Amino acid sequence: MKKQTVSMVFLAAAMLLGSLLAFVPANPLLAADTSWQASYWNNKTLSGSAVLVRNEAELNNDWGDGAPDALIDKDQFSARWTRSINFPTSSSYRFTATMDDGMRVYVDNVLIIDSWTDSQVHALTADVYLNAGDHTVKVEYYEAGGKAVAKLSWVPVGGTAPVPIANWKGEYFNNTSFTGNPVLVRDDASINFDWGVGAPAATVVADNFSARWTRSMNFDAGRYRFIVQVDDGVRLWVNNQLIINQWVNGNTTYTAEIDLPSGSVPIQMEYFESVGGAIAKLSWVKLSGSGEWSGQYFSNKTLSGSPVLTRSDSQINFNWGSGSPGTAVPIDNFSVRWNRSLNFAAGRYRFTATSDDGVRMWVNGQLVINGWSDHTPQTFSGEIDLPNASIPLQVEYYEGVGGAQVQVSWTPISSTPTTPTTPTTPTTPTTPAPTAGTGTVVSAYLNVRTGPGVQYSVITTLVRNQTVNLTGYRNAEGNWVQINMADGTKAWVSGRPYYLQTNVTIANMPVWQGTTSTPAPTSGTGSSRMRIMLTYARGRAWGIR
């Protein structure tokens, strides 16, 4: 009897436990939020302390000309919404952001929609593949003026999980314009393809296709040269800068150089194949460290063509005398370009360059020193206000004949900059506007020619103390200047200081991009080829040019 009673007790307990387990949910409780946490600021930059923090059931706001709350200004305000949301199925989800003015949308801290500009009301979409479960969503918004709209919605659109990418994400399209969805997405170990007349894969056509490769890679700080070989067109972005843009047919190798910071750097290469052979290859090489100058040496005075020597220079402090910087560089008539980036504290700085012959220097994209002329050793200086940042520096130098030297240095002169500057690319300084001026002939005679060189025909001859009106343009080398004749036609004279003295700096003039007449024949002994050379105290030549 006791055993039967004990058995019945255990049976009742088991039944009770079973009934309790039946009410336990099959899935664990969700961590998703039921509402958005909203924060508002009375500025456009989400800066300082929020003036209002509250929960909002949905993100579907059209305030018109009004404000979100009495505490918020109707214009010039910003907001941030954050929320953990449960997505019930693994799928691609299409997020739609509707805004007036700017909005940014992040999913799991990845920026998927970025329209941080003043605008009229408009909508942007982005598709993101999400595994089933909870995901964090963050929306940032600002209102400039006028209407105020901020909305976010999403719907599942199906699709399979993306290909896991460990190297390059390669997206291939059966057209040359990246139109529509890629027909193939894959993980490419490297961009080193020579498909010949074939195709990258069975799903990709052999001709008239395009491909896009993206990834981020860690770099040490320094200057790098990127090399692409393609057949046909290519575009290459490094650290979000377009450094190669050759969207043309042909089998060609292109190179470009860029200074990179230490850390993760995004790279994107776009390519299209027309017909025939298909090649797409990318590589790079480090030229110098961040603490060194990347020097390119040219066997001419104009920094043109390919450098005959590339090396890292710890500093620009050279006095080669009558020698050469290297065996590949000539003793005379050579040029050098140095680049580097350097961290500066905010303040005003004086940059100094001593050279024989020409030198010019850009700091933070601004030309601060311009001594681009033949001269004996001479010192130039310029001052500039710099922010607390990594600043690009570029120095160019050329040697004519005789001694060769160049030294560059700088020193802070104030810790309070008077005019903040914005970093720009040092290799493309702004072209100055032409500045008209006058010139006075200082040699006995000076030929006026149809073009910038002794190979052009002589129009007339000037004598000492005659004046000419300058158009404000020079040739690329800076040794010829353009003038206006009395009848309004344009002509050229030598701009050398021992032929012509000008009231404006020739090196500051923009280079003439127009056309000139055909050069005169080089044979014969006529006046167009005559050059009388006399010597004066400084050892320079003068006379008919």
Image (cartoon, rainbow, N blue to C red):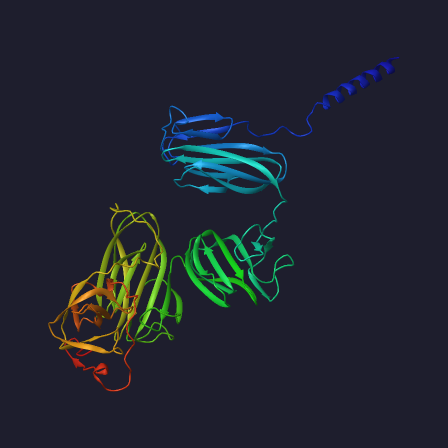
Farthest residue to the bottom: give it: 524
Q: Give x and y (percent) for residue 242.
A: 43, 56
Residue 455, located in which quarter of the rendered image? bottom left
**Residue at x 56%, y 62% (from the top left corner):** 192
- Above or below residue 264? Residue 17 is above
Q: Which quadrant of the figure contains the C terminus? A: bottom left
Q: Is residue 458 left or right of residue 248?
A: left
User: What residue appears at the point 28 percent right and 58 percent down from the top-left corner?
Assistant: 367
Residue sitting nearer the eye, 253 or 314: 253
Q: Can residue 318 be seen in the rendering of this structure?
A: no
Quadrant of the frame with the N terminus: top right
Residue 478 location (% of width, % of height): 26, 68
Q: In this view, does 459 lie above or below 84?
A: below
Q: Can residue 210 be seen in this view?
A: yes
Q: Which of 325 and 541 is in front in this view?
A: 541
The residue located at (56%, 50%) in the rendering is 180
Q: Residue furthest right?
A: 1
Q: In which quarter of the image is residue 380?
A: bottom left
Say whether residue 117 is left or right of residue 378: right
Residue 476 picture location, percent across and down:
29, 68
Extreme-left residue of the structure: 465
Residue at the top extreme of this rendering: 1
Residue occupying the point 55% across, 27% down: 34
Residue 11 % position (x, y): 81, 19
Count of number-bearing discs? 0
